[in-house]
Amino acid sequence: MCCPENREQGVVMNRAAILCVAGILAAASAAFGQNSRVFHGEVSDSQCALNVHSLTRSHQEMLKSKTMGGTSNTCSVYCIEHMGGYLVLSSGDDVLRLDRGDLVHGFEGQRVKVTGVLDAKAKQIHVQKIELESQK
């Protein structure tokens, strides 16, 4: 059997270890949250947003021709599926790649608010959260 003094010492050590791990997790969480930013723009495809087949960084020409659908959503989905594009967030001249297609899919052609971490070198947002931008 274990003597009571050793048992108490073990309990104290376990509590100290748990508090230490909790502190490390809290610090890591705070550091991660500090890098997060909110971005606003339209979820689009890289083809239209980067003027591959557009002159206006938009779906305008494709919508007029009706070759890739009749809405910004259908144009984006078509371009991504059939023309090798990828999902981006476009706002004016800024075009940033979105890395989480699983979260972003379904928002094509929509104005959104994206919470994520910017990799400026890669011009990419690591998406943590995405939601429709509120209509004012």
Image (spheres, rainbow, N blue to C red):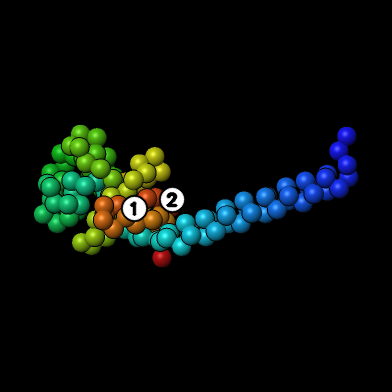
Residue 97 vs residue 53: left or right? right
Q: Quadrant of the C terminus?
A: bottom left
Dot 2 amino acid type: Gln
Estimate the x, y position of residue 9 in percent, counting from the top left: 80, 49
- Taking the spot 39% from the left edge, 39% from the top edge, the residue there is 102
Residue 104 vs residue 95: left or right? right
Disc 1 marks which residue? 125
Mark 2, Cα crowd under 10 Å, few <14 / some 14-19 / many 20+, is: some
State the image quarter where residue 113 is shown.
bottom left
- Taking the spot 11% from the left edge, 54% from the top edge, the residue there is 55
- Taking the spot 88% from the left edge, 45% from the top edge, the residue there is 4
Q: Is residue 133 shown to the viewer in this render? A: no
Disc 1, SS? strand
Q: CA distance from mark 1 to mark 2?
A: 9 Å
Mark 1, Cα crowd under 10 Å, few <14 / some 14-19 / many 20+, is: many
Relative to residue 91, is residue 14 depicted above or below?
Answer: above
Q: Nearer the viewer, residue 118 or 19?
A: 19
Disc 2 marks which residue? 128
Dot 1 amino acid type: Ile
